[in-house]
Every structure is written in structure tokens, then in C-alpha cells.
Amino acid sequence: MSASKRVLIAEDSSVIQNLARKILEFQNYDITAVKNGEQVMQILDKEDFSILLLDINMPVMDGMECVRRVRALSDKQKAAVPIVAITGNAKNYTEEEFKTAGFNDVLVKPLNFDRLVEVVNQLTDK
């Protein structure tokens, strides 16, 4: 990897956020972590990322609302960034609902970290 790939993690659980950060940093990803979707929108305004990992249940703005807002951005490059849902209650949504909202993939909690690395690698190596 020439330039470090940048990952934005939006997750209100510090434990999951820190584990995901450590695992992805070990894979040479540059990690930025925030606690809610509103913070995602604020940071996306100023910075570019290779992929976004969004928890579905977050305070202020949840992952479903956040992915819709990112997909609606006027900056086409930012609007097309790969986005992965992270959810502890995947049963509340169908795979179709995640796709329709704009997610590229879904990771279910408890996180399988091998799968996390696999999905992030797949979506950032295109």
C-alpha cells in the first residue's frame, strides 16, 4: 500500500470502536473514530476516507440516516465511498433495506474481526 487507506468508524461503543481501530491499524489502515452520524457528516465535510463503518444504533444521528445523507452529498466522490453497516440487531432490517439505504455490506455484532478485515480490504482494494 503506497498511501495509507483511511477508515472512518462511527460507533458509540468505545469497546467496539477500540477493537476495530486496533485490528485495522494492524492492517496498516489510518483510523478516525467518532461517536455518531452527525460527527461523520462534519468530518466528511473536511476530509476524504476510503471507507466508512457505521453503527446502526447511535445517538444524535443513527447509521441509517447517516448513510442516506452521505449518498445524497453533492460531492460525487464522497457520496460514492464504500459504507459498511455495523449492527447488533440485524433482524430489525432486511438485507434489502440495508442495500436500499446505501450500504455496501453489513457486519453483525458480535463482530467477527476476520470478516471485518476481509470486508474492508475488499471494499478499499477496488
Image: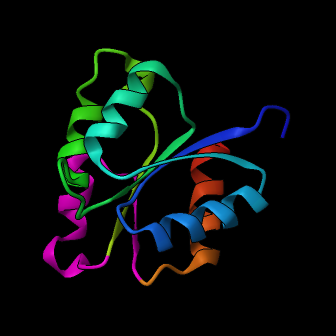
Image quadrant in which the N terminus is located: top right
The picture places residue 48, in percent across and down from the top left corner, at 53, 26
Instruction: Work out whether 94 lies above or below 53.
Output: below
Q: Give the range drawn in magenta.
A: 88-109
The residue furthest right is 2
The image's colouring method is rainbow
User: In the image, what residue occupies the spot 57% across and 49% down?
Assistant: 123
User: In the image, what residue occupies the spot 57% across and 38% down?
Assistant: 50
The total number of labels drawn is 0
Image quadrant in which the C terminus is located: top right
Which one is nearer the viewer's eye here, 114 or 47? 47
Instruction: Describe residue 119's horizontal placement relative to residue 69 as left or right.
Output: right
Instruction: Describe residue 83's horizontal placement relative to residue 33 as left or right.
Output: left
The picture places residue 114, in percent across and down from the top left corner, at 64, 76
Residue 104 belongs to the span the image colors magenta: yes
Instruction: Work out whether 60 lies above or below 105.
Output: above
Which one is nearer the viewer's eye here, 73 or 12? 12
Dividing the picture into quadrants, the one containing residue 90 is: bottom left
